[in-house]
Amino acid sequence: MTTFTLGFFITNALLGVGLAMDAFSVSVANGLNEPCMKKGKMFGIAGMFAFFQALMPMLGWICVHTIMEHFKSFEKLIPWIALLLLGYIGGKMLWEGIKNDDEDPCGKPGLGFTALVVQGIATSIDALSVGFTIAEYNLVPALVAALLIAVITFVICFGGIIIGKTAGSKLCGKAGIFGGIILIGIGLEIFISSFLK
């Protein structure tokens, strides 16, 4: 039985920081792409990433405790899914940044809900394998670990959006191009690093 020791919280906090790095980079890209983003949307984006970063380890935990053999075969697809999703959104952002280079950055439409969900899945899908890390936990400690990961992800992503918005307002029309390049780069990094493990 897992007890809520200091080590438990430190381990899962560090896990949360590690898992949030891709979402942080995408948050920076979103801020770059939408430098006039309102606070409510910033909270929504950070919340969406936090939700998926908590959901995926719990889904992994459920897989470990139920359908372990099926999850193993799905695990090979994770880098491909992340590459396709982030490549598509990044390519779209890059294309719009090139096409609308001289437009007012506050005049163009920002990130839509569907694109945000796709980003959330793409940046957190590798966290499914964290289900193995928390597999020894009972349900309540696993939920606490997922909640801790979510809180840390939210804070880190909110900071990433602020950084991106600040840089985006200085870069004007080029911000969408940089944001798209960042997303494509993250997709490639997830894909390539999966072969180096």
Image: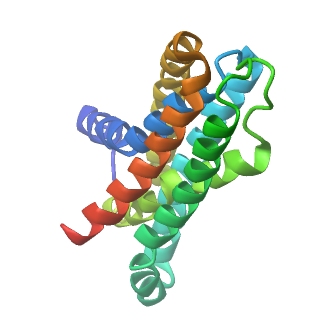
80 and 104: which one is in front? 104
Identify whether 116 is placed above or below 172: below
Quarter of image, res 96? top right
Q: Left or right: where does residue 92 sit relative to residue 63?
A: right
Q: Left or right: where does residue 162 sit relative to residue 18?
A: right
Q: Where residue 109 appears, x then y in whole percent? A: 80, 31
Q: Where residue 117 appears, x then y in whole percent? A: 69, 50
Q: Residue furthest left?
A: 196
Q: Residue at x 39, y 49 (%)?
A: 185
Disc tally is 0
Q: Residue at x 81, y 21 (%)?
A: 107
Q: Where residue 9 appears, x then y in whole percent? A: 33, 35
Residue 134 seen in this snapshot: no
46 and 54: which one is in front? 46
Q: Residue at x 49, y 46 (%)?
A: 183
**Quadrant (top left/top right/bottom left/bottom right) for the C terminus:** bottom left
Image coloring type = rainbow
99 and 132: which one is in front? 99
Q: Where residue 105 appears, x then y in whole percent? A: 70, 20
Residue 49 seen in this snapshot: yes
78 and 56: which one is in front? 78
**Quadrant (top left/top right/bottom left/bottom right) for the N terminus:** bottom left
Identify whether 22 is placed above or below 45: below
Identify whether 120 is placed above or below 105: below
Q: Left or right: where does residue 46 sit relative to residue 19?
A: right
Q: Left or right: where does residue 68 sit relative to residue 56?
A: left
